[in-house]
Image: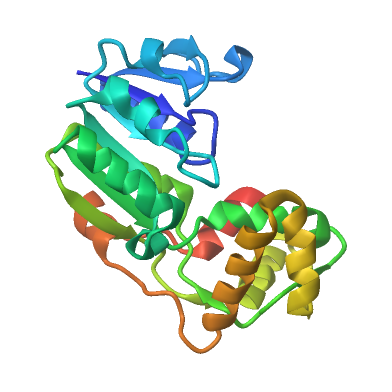
Amino acid sequence: MTVLVTGATGHTGRHVVAGLRAAGVDTRVLVRDRAKAPSGVEVVQGDITDPAEAADGVDAVYLLWPLFAADGIARTLEPFQGKKIVYLSAMSAEHGGVWGDVEAAVEKVTDDWTFLRVTGLASNALAWAQQVGTGVVRAAYGQAKRSVVHERDVADMAVKALTEDHAKQTYLVTGPEAIAQAEQVRLIGEALGKPVTWEEQPPEEAIAQLSRYLGADFAASAVHHWASLVEDPEPVSLDVPRVTGHPARPFAEWAREHFS
């Protein structure tokens, strides 16, 4: 079989490529910048909104949809009619939104789909990197408890879904525990070998700050979600160990890999 990996230079995609190559699977990548493409794979330069060339002749695709709206997703999926599609989705897809819209569109073009719904990626903590250098991270809702997942666990799930029969399966992909954002920051400091503390930011200030690159609606939704997690933590799923055969990697391991 030949598998197409979209988002192949991103946090999860590069590990999906590595996992497929280790499994001996012919791999093609769709990238906007050929210079950043991983080595040892077939490269198609282009954009996910126009994947016809990259989709030609492949049997399966690891799909990322990087936009904040699903406009154009039906046209994007046309070249994948009847193919295996493993889509990196989000837990909130069950309530609709862009992730739910993409899932619905995928179901219209193939019966061989797998949805990997993440609560959140540990790699999102890289957004704190500059503040971590100062020893203080200022953000909203430090006591919001999140079950963020290591990107390599997402990739391991994707490789299993791409190379085995996981048709019409929806998996909740999480880390092994729900830990407060302030505790994540402390663990990053531990990995660095120096204290890093959390400074609580007013929610309105956080929304205004995030709106600059997420848009006002998406930023407000994210901050309101964090607020809910103070009393109602994100769930912890056993799908990672059940599908991959190994425990989900803890946040402390992710912090050591990225900050030590």
Q: Nearer the viewer, residue 239 or 103?
A: 103
Q: Is residue 157 visible?
A: no
Q: Is residue 69 visible?
A: yes
Location of the N terminus by quadrant is top left
Question: Going 58% across and 50% down the picture, which residue do you hit?
Answer: 257
Q: Is residue 124 left or right of residue 209?
A: left
Question: Going 62% across and 13% down the picture, which residue do you hit?
Answer: 35
Q: Is residue 231 left or right of residue 42?
A: right
Residue 67 in the image: x percent, y percent?
A: 54, 41
- The answer to whether residue 45 is above or below residue 143 is above
Residue that extends furthest to the right in the rendered view of this protein: 134
Question: Going 77% across and 53% down the picture, which residue do you hit?
Answer: 212
Residue 207 in the image: x percent, y percent?
A: 73, 67
Question: Going 44% across and 57% down the picture, which residue do you hit?
Answer: 97
Q: Is residue 80 left or right of residue 201?
A: left
Q: Nearer the viewer, residue 186 or 85?
A: 85
Q: Nearer the viewer, residue 16 or 203?
A: 203
Residue 111 in the image: x percent, y percent?
A: 14, 38
Colouring convention used in this rendered image of the protein: rainbow
Hey, which quadrant is residue 54 in on the image?
top left
Residue that extends furthest to the bottom in the rendered view of this protein: 231
Label total for image: 0
Residue 177 in the image: x percent, y percent?
A: 42, 73
Hey, which quadrant is residue 60 in on the image?
top left
